[in-house]
Image: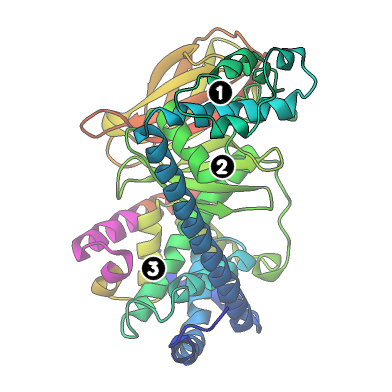
C-alpha cells in the first residue's frame, strides 16, 4: 500500500512526544493504577492501553499541555472497565488462581492492607478522587479536569469517600 | 493518625513496591502498530460493505421499477437454480430445459414463467443446516436450540438489550476482548448513563452468546451464577436505584414470557443498600436466568441491569 503523503511527518512528530510522555508519566500512571487495581501486570496493561488509545489516530487530540490529565483520565476509565470485567469474570467464570509475583508476594503491613482494601471498596468516583488527591496531590481543579466533573463534585466525593473510609476502618478495628 | 494520614501512608507503601517493566515503551509501540492495522482493516470492511449495500440497493431499485420483463428475469433466475439442485427431477420433463433461451424470449411470451411455476416446489427441498450443539447450561441469549445466531458481539448485546431487557434506545460500546473466546460489551440506557457490562462468549466457531451481565448499582449475592434453584427463591444482595426499586424477573429457556416476577428494594440515594426478597416461579425447562433491572427516564424503560444464569432443581 502506498504511503499517505504526510504520514511519515506525522509519525515523526508522534514518536518524540510519545517517548517524552512515556518518560515523564508512565511510572506515575502505573502507580496510580495500582491504587485501584490489585495486580501490577494489569496496571501496566491498563496504562499501555491508555497510551495506545491516546495515540491511536496520531498526535493526541488534547495537545501537549492537557496531555497529563488526558492520560490520567484514560487510565482511570481503563481501571473502571477492568474492575467491572473482573467482577463479571468472578461471577460467571471458574475462578483462576492469580499469580503471586510482584508486590502482592510481599504483603503490605496489616493496617496499610486494610486501608487499601477499604479504598478499593468505595464507589468508583470516590475512589478515584481520593487516589488523585492523596497519591498524586492534585488540586480540586486538576481532579475535576481529569474526571470531567465540577470542582464542587470533587469536594463532595472526597468528603463522602473519606467519611466512608473512616467508618469502615473503624469497623475493622 | 487521621484517615488521611493512613491513606497517604498506605498509598506510598503500595506504590514504592510498584516498578514498571523496562520494555513498556516497546510494548506500547507494538500495540499501536497492531491497533492501527486493525483500524485500517475495519475501515476497509466498512467501505466494502457500503459499496456492496449500494450495489444491492441499485439492483433492487432496477428490479422494482422495471416493466414486465422483470418477471421473466426473476423466473429465469429461479429455474436456473432449480436445475442445479435437481438435474434429473421428473418435473423437468414437463417443460423445456430452463436455459438462457428464456431470457431471449419475446416479452409477450409466457413460456418463461410457466415452467417456473411447475418447478418452484422443488426449490423448497434445500436442506437447513443444523447448528452445532452448544452446552445449553451456559448461555442466556440467544437460545441455542433455535437457529438464531450473532457473529458480532456488539449486535448480540444490542439485540439482548432491546428485545430481552427492554431498553428503548441502548448505547452499545465496543467489544473488549478478554481471553481468545470471550470478552465484554458495555451498554448504557442513555448517553452518559451508568454502564452495564455484558459478558459474551463464543460458544461456536463464529457466533456469540450472552453469559451474564453486571452493573455497579445492582450486586446480587444470592442466587449466584449457575446455582441450582427452586421456587420460592430467596434473593439477597445490594443495590441502589430510583426510589431503591429493582425489578426482578425470572425467565426459563424456550419461553419468552417471564415465569416469575417481583421487586426488591435497596437504596435510592446513590449508595448501595442491602436488599432481601423472594421470587416464586414455574419451571417449564431445566434452565433459566434472573434479570434485575433498575428503571428510569421518562419512558420508565430499564437503564441498568444484571443477569444471572441459573439451573432449576
Which disc number belongs to residue B199? 2
Can residue B2 be seen here? The reply is no
Q: Position of residue A154 (x, y in %)?
A: 26, 62
Give the structural element (helix, strand or loop) at label 3: helix
Task: Please say whether residue A147 is one of the residues in the magenta stretch.
Answer: yes
- In the depicted view, which residue is nearer to us: A147 or B204? B204
- Say which chain tag 2 marks: B
Residue segment shown in magenta = A144-163
Instruction: For marks 2 and 3, give the one nearer the viewer.
Output: 2
Give the structural element (helix, strand or loop) at label 1: loop
Q: CA distance from mark 3 to mark 1?
A: 67 Å
- Say which chain tag 1 marks: B
Residue at 24% over, 34% down:
B297
- In the depicted view, which residue is nearer to us: A35 or A43? A43
Label 1 packing within 10 angstroms: few (<14), some (14-19), many (20+): many
Residue A89 located left or right of residue A52 = right
Give a yes or no on whether discs 2 and 1 share a subunit: yes
Q: Position of residue B277 (x, y in %)?
A: 44, 19
Residue B256 located left or right of residue A40 = left
Q: Quadrant location of the N terminus of chain B?
A: bottom left
Residue at 61% over, 17% down:
B115
Residue position marked by numbered label 3 in the rendering: A73
Q: Quadrant of residue B91?
A: top right
Residue B15 located left or right of residue B60 = right
N-terminal of the two: label 2 or label 1? Answer: 1
- Say which chain tag 3 marks: A
Are the residues tagged 2 and 1 within 8 Å (C-beta)?
no
Residue furthest out toward the right: B88
Amino acid at each position: 500500500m502506498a504511503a499517505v503523503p504526510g504520514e511519515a511527518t506525522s509519525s515523526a512528530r508522534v514518536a518524540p512526544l510519545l517517548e517524552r510522555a512515556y518518560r515523564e508519566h508512565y511510572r506515575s500512571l502505573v502507580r496510580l493504577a495500582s491504587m485501584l487495581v490489585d495486580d501490577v501486570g494489569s496496571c501496566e496493561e491498563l496504562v499501555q492501553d491508555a497510551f495506545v488509545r491516546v495515540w491511536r489516530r496520531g498526535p493526541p487530540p488534547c495537545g501537549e499541555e492537557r496531555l497529563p490529565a488526558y492520560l490520567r483520565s484514560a487510565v482511570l476509565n481503563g481501571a473502571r472497565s477492568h474492575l467491572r470485567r473482573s467482577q463479571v469474570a468472578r461471577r460467571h467464570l471458574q475462578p483462576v488462581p492469580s499469580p503471586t509475583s510482584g508486590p502482592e508476594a510481599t504483603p503490605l503491613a496489616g493496617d496499610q492492607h486494610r486501608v487499601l482494601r477499604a479504598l478499593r471498596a468505595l464507589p468508583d468516583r470516590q475512589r478515584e478522587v481520593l487516589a488523585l488527591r492523596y497519591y498524586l496531590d492534585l488540586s480540586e481543579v486538576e481532579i475535576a479536569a481529569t474526571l470531567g466533573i465540577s470542582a464542587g463534585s470533587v469536594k463532595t466525593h472526597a468528603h463522602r469517600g473519606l467519611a466512608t473510609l473512616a467508618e469502615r476502618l473503624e469497623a475493622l478495628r | 493518625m487521621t484517615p488521611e494520614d493512613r491513606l497517604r501512608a498506605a498509598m506510598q507503601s503500595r506504590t514504592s513496591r510498584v516498578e514498571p517493566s523496562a520494555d513498556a515503551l516497546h510494548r506500547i509501540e507494538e500495540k499501536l502498530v497492531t491497533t492501527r492495522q486493525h483500524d485500517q482493516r475495519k475501515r476497509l470492511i466498512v467501505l466494502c460493505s457500503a459499496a456492496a449495500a449500494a450495489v444491492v440497493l441499485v439492483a433492487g431499485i432496477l428490479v422494482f421499477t422495471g416493466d414486465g420483463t422483470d418477471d421473466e428475469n426473476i423466473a429465469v433466475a429461479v429455474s436456473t437454480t432449480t436445475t442445479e439442485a435437481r438435474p434429473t427431477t421428473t418435473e423437468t420433463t414437463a417443460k423445456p430445459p430452463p436455459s438462457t433461451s428464456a431470457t431471449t424470449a419475446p416479452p409477450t411470451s409466457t413460456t418463461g414463467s410457466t415452467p417456473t411455476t411447475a418447478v418452484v416446489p422443488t426449490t423448497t427441498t434445500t436442506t437447513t443446516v443444523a447448528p452445532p450443539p452448544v452446552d445449553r447450561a451456559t448461555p442466556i441469549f440467544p437460545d441455542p436450540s433455535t437457529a438464531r445466531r450473532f457473529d458480532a458481539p456488539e449486535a448480540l448485546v444490542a439485540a439482548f438489550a432491546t428485545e430481552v431487557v427492554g431498553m428503548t434506545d441502548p448505547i452499545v460500546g465496543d467489544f473488549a476482548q478478554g481471553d481468545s473466546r470471550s470478552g465484554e460489551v458495555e451498554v448504557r440506557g442513555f448517553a452518559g448513563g451508568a454502564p452495564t457490562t455484558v459478558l459474551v462468549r463464543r460458544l461456536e466457531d463464529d457466533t456469540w452468546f450472552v453469559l451474564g451481565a453486571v452493573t455497579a448499582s445492582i450486586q446480587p449475592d444470592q442466587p449466584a451464577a449457575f446455582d441450582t434453584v427452586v421456587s420460592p427463591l430467596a434473593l439477597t444482595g445490594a443495590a441502589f436505584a430510583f426510589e431503591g426499586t429493582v425489578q426482578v424477573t425470572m425467565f426459563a429457556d424456550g419461553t419468552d414470557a417471564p415465569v416469575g416476577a417481583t421487586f426488591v428494594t435497596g437504596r435510592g440515594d446513590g449508595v448501595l443498600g442491602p436488599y432481601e426478597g423472594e421470587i416464586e416461579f414455574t419451571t417449564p425447562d431445566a434452565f433459566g436466568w434472573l434479570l434485575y433491572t433498575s428503571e428510569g427516564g421518562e419512558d420508565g424503560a430499564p437503564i441498568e441491569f444484571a443477569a444471572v444464569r441459573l439451573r432449576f432443581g
